[in-house]
Image (cartoon, grey):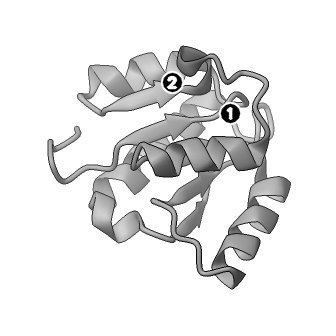
Amino acid sequence: MAVVGLSARIYLDHNVRTQLATELRSRHFDVVHAQDLGLGRASDEEHLEVAVEQGRLLVSHDQKDFKRIAAEWAMAERAHFGIVLARQPPALPYRAFVGRLLVILDERTAEEFVNLVRWI
């Protein structure tokens, strides 16, 4: 369950099911999906930039590209509000993904996610 002012605000990129936004909102998380913003076709870099502009933790299944982008941002000393990467279903079943994501979200404050990359 989200704690206002402490929990990370979340940005789900276009690779994540929109259903997850609804599930997280029901647990009081401040969450936006790329499709909510008309960004379904944005590049991965654009997704991260929007997440940063909005002060949000980015969640994606695009492990390969975001691993590279996170490394590039670290080298350039560009800050972000955290990135959580998960294997795409069916490699990681959807329910397992949701459960693991909730554990990660509950174990850290928004501040503790800054510049952190977590793998599910």
Q: Is residue 18 left or right of residue 102?
A: right
Query: Real-space Cα distance between discs 2 and 1?
Result: 13 Å
Residue at 85% across, 57% down: 64
Mark 1 surroundings: few (<14), some (14-19) or many (≥20) residues within 10 A: few
Residue 50 visible in the current orientation: yes
Residue 50 position within the rendered picture, expressed as x and y whole percent measured from the top left: 56, 42
Q: Earlier in the sequence, mark 2 or mark 1?
A: 2
Residue 34 position within the rendered picture, expressed as x and y whole percent measured from the top left: 60, 26
Q: Determine whether the residue tagged by mark 2 lies in a helix, strand or loop.
A: helix
Going by the numbered disc 2, the residue's amino acid type is Leu
Judge by depth and name the residue closer to the eye, 95 or 52.
Answer: 52
Q: Can you say whether 88 is above or below 114 in the image?
A: above
Q: Residue furthest left?
A: 4
Judge by depth and name the residue closer to the eye, 99 or 5.
Answer: 5
Which numbered tag is attached to residue 58?
Answer: none
Going by the numbered disc 1, the residue's amino acid type is Pro
For the C terminus, which image quadrant? bottom right
> Residue tagged by mark 1?
93
For the N terminus, which image quadrant? top left
Which numbered tag is attached to residue 20?
Answer: 2
Q: Determine whether the residue tagged by mark 1 lies in a helix, strand or loop.
A: loop
Residue 60 visible in the current orientation: no
Q: Can you say whether 80 is above or below 35 in the image?
A: below
Residue at 67% across, 48% down: 86
Q: Is residue 107 left or right of residue 15?
A: left
Residue 26 position within the rendered picture, expressed as x and y whole percent measured from the top left: 29, 20
Residue 91 position within the rendered picture, expressed as x and y whole percent measured from the top left: 80, 40
* Count of picture labels: 2
Judge by depth and name the residue closer to the eye, 100 or 81.
Answer: 81
Residue at 51% across, 24% down: 20
